[in-house]
Image: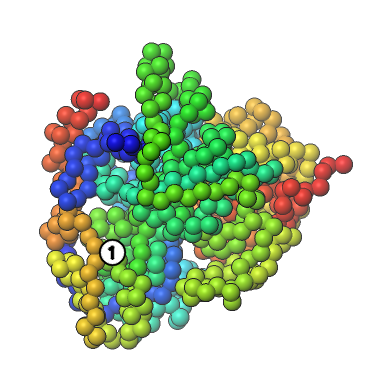
Amino acid sequence: MIALKKIHSRFVPLQMENVDTDQIIPARFLKATTRDGFGKNLFRDWRYENNDDTKPKPDFVMNQAKFSGEVLVAGKNFGCGSSREHAAWALQDYGFKAVVSSFFADIFKNNALNNGVLPVKVSDDFLAQLFELGAEDTISIDVEQQSILIDSTGEEEKFEINLYKKTCLLNGYDDIDYLISNREAIEAFENKL
Amino acid sequence: MAKTLFDKIWDNHVVKQVEDGPSVVYIDKHFIHEVTSPQAFSGIEKRGLKVFRPDKVVATADHNVPTINQHLPIKDELSRLQVQQLIDNCKKHHIELYGLGHPFQGIVHVIGPELGITQPGMTIVCGDSHTSTHGAFGAIAFGIGTSEVEMVFASQCLLQSKPKLMRINIEGTLSEGVVSKDIILYIIAKITASGATGYFVEYAGSAIRALSMEARMTICNMSIEMGARGGMIAPDEVTFNYIKGRQFAPAGEQWENKIAAWKQLYSDADAVFDVEINIDASEIDPMITYGTNPGLGISIQGHIPVTENITDEGERKNIIKALEYMGLESGKSLLGMPIQHVFIGSCTNSRIEDLRLVASVVKGRKKNENVQVMIVPGSQQVARQAQAEGLNKIFLEAGFEIRQAGCSACLGMNDDKIPAGEYCISTSNRNFEGRQGAGARTLLASPLTAAAAAITGVITDVRELEPIH
């Protein structure tokens, strides 16, 4: 996993609640056997008319040239539904390093963290402020400080992340390394079963 | 100290607590399927690892398999490749596979219980959000992502933070025509599609105790649709009687020992939950969804909310968008609305009892000529039993199409899709945009409600279906 420390970027505002993983990456794209290349199908059916990638839907934020950046900002309950990690892979492959929302579904949150995509949970009020900003506005996210800052207004909020996951993100460690290092304890546990 | 059912199982499985972090939790049973496992296998191989405890892993092919001509090679190249990779990976890593053609093949959450693999007190995971189904046996069961599948392959453990706990008590007696699917759709409509996010849910109360094992599975199955990581029900005689004698159930002296241990699995009388919700079973009507998340459901006798009256702006926008997608109008009743498809299947409602419910409505009738009806049994075993009980005859005489086991039109990864703009009453679990095919419009309901619509061709209250003359 690649380490993630700071992000300073514009953001793409997806002002929708309950964005489910079937929208992030529709099931028909889950037949791949590698983790690569999902970005082109991110939000496929919201992005294109009739599944035709030569016909982008002009109303969808990702198709509007003025919006760009490494951060996706979305309404509450982002990532609900299917456990497909392909959703996190698609966001990452497209170039998003963080998703900001006022509420994340549990499995998506874990999947994102396991791929170095940071879920930043902010208050409803802070989220509303983000949606009011212009396309050229930037935000700064600092993993060490657990903070998210709107650069133009100076408005800042802290976000939660457990110390273990924070250490993993800052150093690019993943859970598997940690679990394997505990095999002796695991075997001892099994012997007691 | 008083413990909840969840606490008791969790405490039995904590290998180690990480300082200021999650726990290393031991996993008793790991189910895998073709769609969320290939990258996990290649992940451990890249690290030069073998599957740590292959005897604790069980595999099946269900998500993308065709439901006709399963004896022939899969036509879709990508699906064929994915299924072949599962075969190769299981062989290489010595994992038991109930693949296509095997008499135990079926939807992963149907076969685990029916084979007696799923047992009380276990920790169970699978790269599928509906793993919550297995919680009906008094197990901690939850869906995981592919990186987590890889972790379990590598160590038989996961790093997990203990969730908050919610108990939903449903007391009283269900009305006629109301089944377990209606209970869970009612709960989700009440607390919303995110109402239990961050929680593990225990379902309790006299209405739950009165349910069969398969009906309990339907409830736990949809826990994820209100955001809960899992759902669970304390095991009792219903549970024990269901498990006894199944293929992989304990037997003899081992059975007696297990029963003694399983009887300890309940929430202590003074155990404390972070949240408790009480529901009166008699308030629940047959339910149906009108929107694009499972929380947007109403009584079949009810009306779609009037959007102008919704005060929360976010929610109002959501419902307006959902109604636009669904081609439905604010404030209207759904009764009498024509539908074009009925799908009976999925890990929610494809077990033998579900098929018996459908048959009880359909027997001696014919489907409406404008409706296509597809029945997809949850497993090969369910299919054989339906045949043996004469249910297939009832379905065929009614003009239903009977398919072979798989996830099918629940998520439309194979050819079983609903055409854009058409309506499908589905016994599955998700009505998301495009879930059953791009542009498809899904209305979630119980097997009884789906069967009634198959006969009339319109959305029907099964209690009002005219008797056969």
The residue most toward the front is B270
Look at the picture and state if B26 lies above or below A158. Answer: above
In the picture, the quarter occupied by the C terminus of chain A is: top left
The residue at the far top in this view is B253
Occupied quadrant, residue B5: top left
- Residue B410 pos. (x, y %): 53, 51
Residue at image point 28% right, 59% down: A112
Visible in this render: residue B410?
no
* Left or right: residue B392 compared with residue A138: right
Task: Confirm whether residue A164 shows in the render.
Answer: yes
Query: Type of residue at label 1?
Result: Pro
Quarter-wise, where is residue B354 in the image? top right
Residue at image position (59%, 76%) is: B308
Left or right of B288 on screen, residue B265: left
Q: Which residue shows up at 34% across the image and 50% down it?
A: B164
> Residue B92 at x, y = what percent?
28, 34
Q: How is the image coloured?
A: rainbow
Identify the residue position indicated by label 1 in the image: A119
Q: Residue at x 48, y 28 (%)?
A: B236
Indicate the position of residue B233 as horizontal and vertical percent values.
Answer: 45, 37
- Of B421 and A21, the residue lying toward us: A21
Where is residue B151? Give x, y as percent. Answer: 24, 44
Q: Quadrant of the N terminus of chain A?
A: bottom left
Compared with A188, A106 (above or below) is below
| Label 1: few (<14), some (14–19) or many (≥20) C-alpha neighbours in 10 Å | many
Query: What subunit carries mark 1?
Result: A
Establish if B422 lies above or below B347.
below
Q: Nearer the viewer, residue A123 or B40?
A: A123
Return the residue found at the far right. Answer: B469
